[in-house]
Image (cartoon, rainbow, N blue to C red):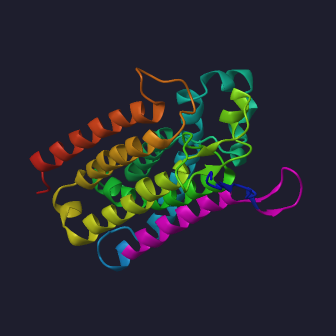
């Protein structure tokens, strides 16, 4: 007897006012991610693990929001849909329908952080170490929102926990009825979000590397995230053409891994005075 797989029927709206307007889980995920970052940065300051108080945190979160949204959106078009932005430039602003690239968001956050540390006259590497410990919370909420939206679906599978996403674009493009698929969004939420959050918080609170080896936590984050992302990509249906036989998420993650290793080596060789 064939397995009865759950059919995804969740609405992307928490509250819906019209066909395309309402309070979306995707937007709430970003709010939750930034709220978690504020809470963690404030806790670091209260516990004496960070010199940046409420005013600096407020300024930092403001520029990070801009960096994430602009970098993530621009990265999505440049890395996954380069032709779409040219054919429909206004689609850049339709962020409530999804379409954000984490790798582009990293670049946006890096540029925003660079601007903030110049204003604060503080260390870029030390500030980066604080920020990366908060980032996985955003991935956790974001990937859960991807699941609720029924987007970024996994590869076809008959495992007991596979999910049927009736409106996924993959099956539509193939002209076939929706088939059971890995809930790869939940795998990513667990690996890129929850596991990374636990790892970063454990490293931050249970070691002194943030003070003694600036940049090391950032390096560990990039390296661990790259590994987690590549594992999740094994189960995810590629959402763009392959590069050198690899999904784009895996290919771009290789550069994060290299950057992470470089930061770790630099931190070990050049510890804080």
Residue 237: x and y in percent read: 54, 37
Residue at 24 percent of width and 61 percent of height: 210
Residue at the far right in the pictured view: 18
Residue 2, relative to residue 34: is it above or below?
above
Instruction: Tell me where the magenta segment starts and ends, as one range.
Output: 14-43
Asked if the stretch drawn in magenta spans residue 16, the answer is: yes
Residue 178 horizontal side relative to residue 141, left or right = right
Q: Is residue 133 visible?
A: no
Residue 145's place in the image compared with 79, above or below, is below
| Point 27% across, 51% down: residue | 220
Please indicate whether residue 232 sits to the left or right of residue 84 in the image: left
Q: Residue at x 45, y 22 (%)?
A: 243
| 238 is within the stretch colored magenta | no
In the image shown, does 67 or 247 lie closer to the viewer? Answer: 247
Question: Across the whole image, how many numbered discs are drawn on residues?
Answer: 0
Where residue 113 sits in the image (x, y, percent)? 42, 49
Question: Which is nearer the eye, 219 or 80?
Answer: 80
Answer with the quarter of the image where residue 80 lies. Answer: top right
Return the x and y of residue 208 as percentages of the image width and height: 18, 66
Question: Of residues 139 and 5, which is closer to you in this image?
Answer: 5
Q: Is residue 142 above or below residue 233?
A: below
């Amino acid at each position: 007897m064939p397995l009865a797989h759950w059919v995804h029927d969740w609405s992307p709206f928490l509250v819906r006012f019209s066909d395309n307007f309402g309070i979306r889980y995707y937007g709430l995920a970003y709010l939750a991610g930034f709220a978690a970052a504020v809470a963690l940065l404030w806790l670091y300051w209260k516990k004496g693990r960070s010199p940046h108080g409420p005013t600096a945190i407020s300024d930092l979160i403001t520029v990070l929001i801009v960096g994430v949204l602009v970098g993530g959106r621009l990265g999505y078009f440049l890395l996954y849909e380069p032709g779409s932005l040219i054919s429909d430039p206004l689609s850049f602003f339709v962020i409530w329908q999804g379409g954000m690239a984490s790798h582009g968001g990293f670049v946006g956050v890096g540029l925003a952080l660079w601007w903030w540390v110049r204003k604060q006259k503080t260390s870029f590497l030390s500030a980066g170490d604080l920020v990366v410990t908060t980032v996985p919370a955003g991935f956790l909420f974001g990937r859960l929102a991807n699941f609720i939206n029924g987007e970024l679906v996994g590869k076809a599978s008959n495992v007991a926990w596979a999910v049927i996403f009736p409106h996924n674009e993959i099956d539509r493009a193939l002209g076939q009825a929706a088939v059971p698929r890995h809930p790869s969004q939940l795998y990513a939420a667990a690996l890129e979000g929850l596991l990374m959050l636990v790892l970063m918080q454990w490293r931050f609170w249970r070691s002194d590397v943030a003070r003694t080896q600036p940049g090391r936590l950032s390096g560990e984050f990039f390296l661990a995230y790259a590994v987690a992302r590549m594992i999740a990509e094994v189960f995810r249906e590629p959402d763009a053409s392959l590069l050198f036989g690899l999904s784009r998420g895996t290919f771009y993650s290789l550069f994060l891994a290299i950057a992470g290793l470089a930061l770790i080596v630099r931190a070990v060789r050049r510890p804080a005075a």
